[in-house]
Image (cartoon, helix red, strand yellow):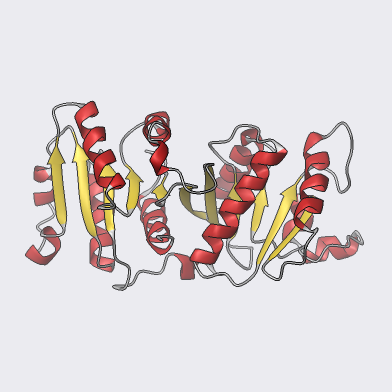
Amino acid sequence: MQYQHLIEPSNTLTGNVAVLYANDEKMIAVLVKALMMTDIDIYIYDTQDTTEIIRSFNLESQILNRIHTFTFSSDYQLLKQCSEDLSRGKISVLMKGNMKASSLLSFILSNKNFIDNYGFLNHLVCFNVPNYHKTLMVSDVAYNISPTIEEKKQIINNLVHFSKKIGYTHFNIGLLSSVESPHKKIQSSVDAEKIKHIFNREANDYLNIDGPILFDNAISKKNAIQKNIKSNIAGDVDALIVSNTDVGSVLSKSLVYFSNASVASLLLGAKFPIVFTSRTENKQNKLDSLLLALRAQN
């Protein structure tokens, strides 16, 4: 699926979005743009009064009426209220604002009722790479440090669930490694072989998994043909599962800085989509992440 189809704005995109700590011009600008492009409502939870920043945008009343601000005297009260609103179903999407990633994760993990059926969270980044013919997803970039085989199975389950929600009809997953066949000294290759057999025991018209697979074979059919690689996902992967966050982080930053890739980042596995972007992320990537989350609502 093309990246633009995933983040295409539409007035059919609805929902109530909770934003934790939206206390600067950059964050408010993203939210205002989203309000203009969709039919959502924004709920800002902060310990700072954000009304002055919002007023500086000179918004029309129909936009202004869809922004709801709540100012709290402490972080505890803020998170308590947001937790109650999420638990009651008042909020359908959670967005990380100007707060540390660890603080948001602590908030999510301390509320067990937030976690979905699979009971496992993973961080997914969707890339729009100029030289690749469709969206490329990578997990785990910034959360699961060194997932086990069982955890990688959960990551795959989350990816399948998510991809179906946003409109995929077929999904190819590559289990990334530095070799093309299992090698006992390279754990990622051993894990990949086992995971592939687990998922391929039964015929599945939707999901196609292969590994271990090299990065160049995963994204280039030409390379795979030249190497005589027998893989029906070579050059056509929708998602890559990396062995650990070292690999995920380096791959992610390489695609952004060397390939000028656009990104949308989400945390999967909760009962609601979580926009999980860095505080230094640019406005467009934050907006893309929010639009993607809106498409992934239950």
Q: Please give the name of the residue rendered at 59% of the width and 38% of the height, measured from the top-left corner.
A: 249
Q: Nearer the viewer, residue 241 or 272?
A: 272
The quarter in which the C terminus is drawn is bottom left
At x 52%, y 58%, the residue is 162
Residue 158 located left or right of residue 152: left
What residue appears at the point 88 percent right and 43 percent down from the top-left corner? Answer: 182
Q: Judge whether 291 appears above or below 241 on screen.
A: below
Residue in the foreground of this view, choosing between 3 and 68:
68
Residue beneath the point at 62% across and 38% down: 250
Q: In the rendering, at what x and y percent does residue 198 appear?
A: 78, 51
Q: Is residue 23 visible?
A: no
Which one is in front, 157 or 62? 157
Relative to 282, say whether 8 is above or below: below
| Number of numbered discs visible in the structure rendering | 0
Quadrant holding the N terminus:
bottom right
Instruction: Locate residue 237: give its quadrant.
Output: bottom right
Q: Is residue 170 left or right of residue 162?
A: right
